[in-house]
Amino acid sequence: GAGVSQSPSNKVTEKGKDVELRCDPISGHTALYWYRQSLGQGLEFLIYFQGNSAPDKSGLPSDRFSAERTGGSVSTLTIQRTQQEDSAVYLCASSLEVGLDVSYEQYFGPGTRLTVT
Amino acid sequence: GESVGLHLPTLSVQEGDNSIINCAYSNSASDYFIWYKQESGKGPQFIIDIRSNMDKRQGQRVTVLLNKTVKHLSLQIAATQPGDSAVYFCAENMAQAGTALIFGKGTTLSVSS
């Protein structure tokens, strides 16, 4: 079956513009995660969704970052008034479900490479 | 702080050798550990995981060892192949904080023929 897909694969934007990044999780996966990966670095957690709600937004770096998920499926990560330090690869992952004492494998998409000029 | 790190940023091996990639974690409350492989231009790919109630788990050509006493995790790749060349990340999950994975910075494995 299809894996996690993300669009666009690459996005170049000017400083100060808003951008929207899209993630289509694997069908049936209730949990969805957003991570950010800067050049040569590990992945930095941003936010996760269980269904349409986001119990953990602690990783969002500033109030310019927001995310939503509708219908328990597609998610959009929005960055307002982009800054050069926002340049990174934004990765989305999904898993079957989430629970305090249970962890399930997270399947990653290919990422969106964002460049802010 | 709560972080997962790797001992070496790069590792170079010959084809056919066994590779060992190490990782140290700092949070003793972590109960789930995962190794991911990331090839250039792609998202991380799950390799193997282990829970804190185990100290060893084997997959196909890969073995993960967990030493909770010293908070150390390792990934062993048997008979390393050129296709194994990638960046390898360890990650931990702290049940109390939900399921967000905390990743280390990665080790770049280069396999030469």
Image (cartoon, rainbow, N blue to C red):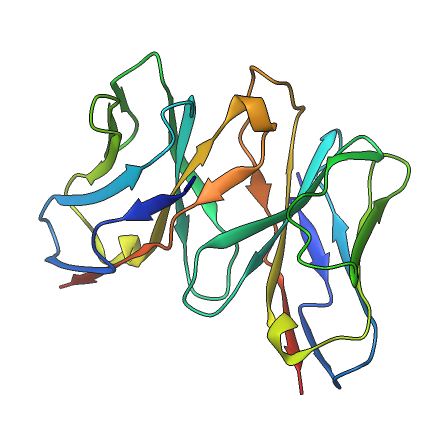
Does B103 sit above or below residue A30?
below
**Along the line of sight, the residue nearer the viewer: A86 or B34:** A86
Location of residue B109 (image quadrant): bottom left
Residue B1 location, x and y as percent? 41, 42
Does B43 sit above or below residue B41?
above
**Along the line of sight, the residue nearer the viewer: B5 or A27:** B5
Residue in the image at 18% along x and 48% along y: B80
Residue in the image at 83% along x and 33% along y: A53
Q: Which residue occupies the extreme front position in the image?
A: B1
Left or right? Give the position of A69 relative to B21: right
Left or right? Give the position of A86 relative to B71: right
Q: Quadrant of the C terminus of chain B?
A: bottom left
Location of residue A110 (image quadrant): bottom right
Does B48 sit above or below residue A17?
above
Left or right? Give the position of A70 relative to B82: right
Residue A90 location, x and y as percent? 63, 60
Residue B69 location, x and y as percent? 21, 21
Q: Which residue occupies the extreme top position in the image?
A: B53
Residue A79 location, x and y as percent? 78, 65
Left or right? Give the position of B33 relative to A16: left
Does B86 sit above or below residue B45?
below
Location of residue A66 (image quadrant): bottom right
